[in-house]
Image (cartoon, helix red, strand yellow):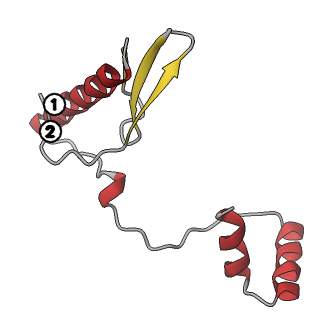
Amino acid sequence: MTLNNDHYTYRVTWSEEDEEYIGLCAEFPSLSWLAATLEEALQGIREVVADVIGDMQASSEAIPEPIATRKFSGKFMVRIPPEQHRRLVLEAAEAGVSLNRLASSKLSQ
């Protein structure tokens, strides 16, 4: 089975342990597919995902939304130790930028 409009996030990497390529899908972290070639690993994981989605639809389970089509607010909360928070506020003040701007800059490096 294949999916129409397949927008899931796939990755193929070499598995030294298995001595084969392994296909993975970020939205379905428990699924994988081993194959001798990179192309076969990608095709295999896409087919496994399609089969699982078919089973999920048949049993009325919620299907994960592809990361590529999700809407993001640009906000997320991070908890850090108070002393690190203070150090970052001081660093931002000395640089003449907001704490958000400083954090965004550090995260993009």
Residue at the (56%, 68%) spot, across then down: 76
- Where disc 2 sits, the SS reads loop
Residue at the (72%, 67%) spot, across then down: 106
Q: Nearer the viewer, mark 2 or mark 1?
A: 2
Q: Tell me the residue that label 2 is attached to.
A: 3
The x and y percentages for residue 75 are: 53, 73
Q: Earlier in the sequence, mark 2 or mark 1?
A: 2
Q: Tell me the residue that label 1 is attached to.
A: 55
The x and y percentages for residue 102 are: 73, 77
Where is residue 8, by image quadrant?
top left
Image-based side of 65 in relation to 84, left or right: left
- Give whichever of 6, 76 is nearer the camera: 6
Residue at the (73%, 81%) spot, across then down: 99
Mark 1 is surrounded, within 10 Å at the Cα level, by few (under 14), some (14 to 19) or many (20 or more) other residues, namely few
The amino acid at mark 1 is Asp
- Number of marks drawn: 2
